[in-house]
Image: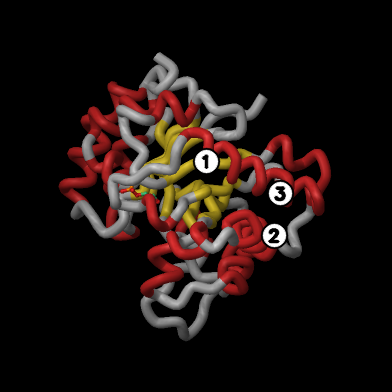
Amino acid sequence: MRKPIIAGNWKMNKTPSEAKALVTELIPLVKDANCDVVVGVPAVNFAAVAEVIKGTNIKLGAQNMHWKESGAYTGELSAAMLKECGVEYVILGHSERRQYFGETDATVNLRTLAAVKAGLTPIICVGEKKEEREAGYTNALVAYQTLIALTGLTAEQVKNVVIAYEPVWAIGTGLTATDEQANETIGVIRAAIRGVYGDAADEVRIQYGGSMNPKNCKGLMAQPEIDGGLIGGASLKAPDFAQVVNFDK
Ligand code: 13P
């Protein structure tokens, strides 16, 4: 059985004082969660959030990282920097990074390899755009994005990676994939992983992301292939995020 994982992706929201207030409110609301709980926060909030969540069941996540260990890469952060700040998870290849910041499948792969090497758990985002779904390319595309991202990892390493299936047309739009659509595409991703890494695929946790909220989380989480959620907008309000975390209660 795969342990569910619910992660918040705060994106470019919350200053350090606001971040502190949000996690302080969240702690008592999620303390009895049966899933792994992660908050993916802007890097300027690492210190404030790490201090508040110490000793709780909430884990710290980053939203990106560079693959080099150090050097002349202005504005970038290394895995070691994240680790020393208490970060355990790192979101990689989010569609917003692909769309606005030139992220490619090849650089997602480099980041994934560097994250795993450093002992961080990557949350690798894949997903199709609306026109790609309409053209019938969804399955091929998510399988390709996933396998490129994982290239160079051993089956043992793949087991610990988290994949987030985020249809781009469902992000921040209020449109969600139906429970069945999400389950089917996540099944395709798992089958692609199985094709290369065998039974390791059964241990990989694959989240759904895209307008997931307190209302639709139960239906999505009831699907057999869906192991969690990557939550944007609804992760910015503690009661809403807590309801998603407590989807099984
Ligand atoms: P929303 O939940 O706001 O649609 O964002 C989803 C997302 O992009 C999480 O990474």
For the residues labelled 2 and 3, the Cα–Cα distance comes to: 11 Å
Q: Look at the numbered disc 2 and give the secondary structure of its residue.
A: helix
**Residue ID at (45%, 77%):** 102
**Where residue 147 is drawn, which disc sits there?**
2
* Residue at 53 percent of width and 50 percent of height: 123
* Residue 30 pos. (x, y %): 35, 24
* Neighbourhood count class around disc 1 (C-alpha, 10 Å): few under 14, some 14–19, many 20 upward: few
- The residue carrying mark 3 is 158
Residue 80 visible in the displayed image? no
- Asked where in the image residue 202 lies, by quadrant, the reply is top right
The answer to whether residue 245 is left or right of residue 67 is left
Instruction: Indicate the amino acid at tag 3.
Output: Val
Q: Is residue 125 visible?
A: yes
Give me the disc on residue 134: none
Check disc 1 and give the amino acid type: Gln
Q: Quadrant of residue 153?
A: bottom right
Q: Is mark 2 within 8 Å of ligand 1?
A: no
Q: Which residue is mark 1?
A: 181
Residue at horizontal 38%, vertical 22%? 246
> Real-space Cα distance between discs 1 and 2?
20 Å
| Amino acid on which the number 2 mark rests in the picture | Leu
Q: Earlier in the sequence, mark 1 or mark 2?
A: 2
Q: Earlier in the sequence, mark 3 or mark 1?
A: 3
